Image (cartoon, rainbow, N blue to C red):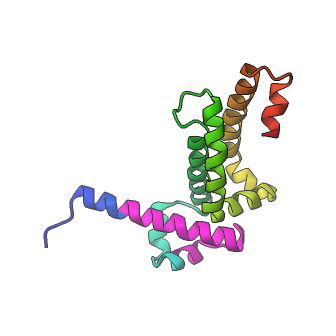
């Protein structure tokens, strides 16, 4: 058997990271962030704790990665053409797609909403959440301003 190529190693690494994320998300959503340990995640992923640390330096880094990826998916639904401008068609698409995302990714959203209720955990991912929130709020406010709403910021906050 010939040695693995750099591409093969990268594919293995990508698959292993996805496995770790999947198991961590499930455990965080079911058991909570504080109750879930790195050992539990490694056990569920079928790897050693040491190997998990080759992929993530801490449980906090893993949580940040999960939240960043989930929120990026949300952002892609809000601004699919990535131009920073929300159109009526994009708003309709976003509402439809977000319903599907909320239904399909229940573990992520369960984790996300539980984080919002836990100040100590929220502090870990606050910058990731606030960056996205600010971007989306600005796009919504601009949309409602262009549409002629009297108080576009309130409309954006309500959405």
Query: Is 112 in front, or is 20?
Result: 112
Residue 58, above or below 148: below
Q: Is residue 152 magenta?
A: no
Q: Quadrant of residue 93?
A: top right
Measured as percent of width and height from the top left, residue 95 is found at 67, 44
Residue 47, above or below 113: below
Q: Is residue 130 rendered to the left or right of residue 8?
A: right
Measured as percent of width and height from the top left, residue 81 is found at 51, 33
Q: Residue at x 52, y 75 (%)?
A: 42
Task: Report how many numbered discs are placed on residues in the image.
Answer: 0
Q: Residue furthest left?
A: 2
Q: Residue at x 54, y 37 (%)?
A: 80
Q: Residue at x 63, y 42 (%)?
A: 94
Q: Which residues are magenta?
A: 13-42
Q: Residue at x 82, y 32 (%)?
A: 155
Q: Is residue 28 magenta?
A: yes
The secondary structure making up most of the magenta span is helix
Q: Quadrant of residue 16?
A: bottom left
Measured as percent of width and height from the top left, residue 133 is found at 70, 39
Quarter of the rendering occupied by the N terminus: bottom left
Query: Is 9 in front, or is 144?
Result: 144
Quarter of the rendering occupied by the C terminus: top right
Query: Is 85 in front, or is 69?
Result: 85
Q: Quadrant of residue 89?
A: top right
Measured as percent of width and height from the top left, residue 36 is found at 66, 73
């Amino acid at each position: 058997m010939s040695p693995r190529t750099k591409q093969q190693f990268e594919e293995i690494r990508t698959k292993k990271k996805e496995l770790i994320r999947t198991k961590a998300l499930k455990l965080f959503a079911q058991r909570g962030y504080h109750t879930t340990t790195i050992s539990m995640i490694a056990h569920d992923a079928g790897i050693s704790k040491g190997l998990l640390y080759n992929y993530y330096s801490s449980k906090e880094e893993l949580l940040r990665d999960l939240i960043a990826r989930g929120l990026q998916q949300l952002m892609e639904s809000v601004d699919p053409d990535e131009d920073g401008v929300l159109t009526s068609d994009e708003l309709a698409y976003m509402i439809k797609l977000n319903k599907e995302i909320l239904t399909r990714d229940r573990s992520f959203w369960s984790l996300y909403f539980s984080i919002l209720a836990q100040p100590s955990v929220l502090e870990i991912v606050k910058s990731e959440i606030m960056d996205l929130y600010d971007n989306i709020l600005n796009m919504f406010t601009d949309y409602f301003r262009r549409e002629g709403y009297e108080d576009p910021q309130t409309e954006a906050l309500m959405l």
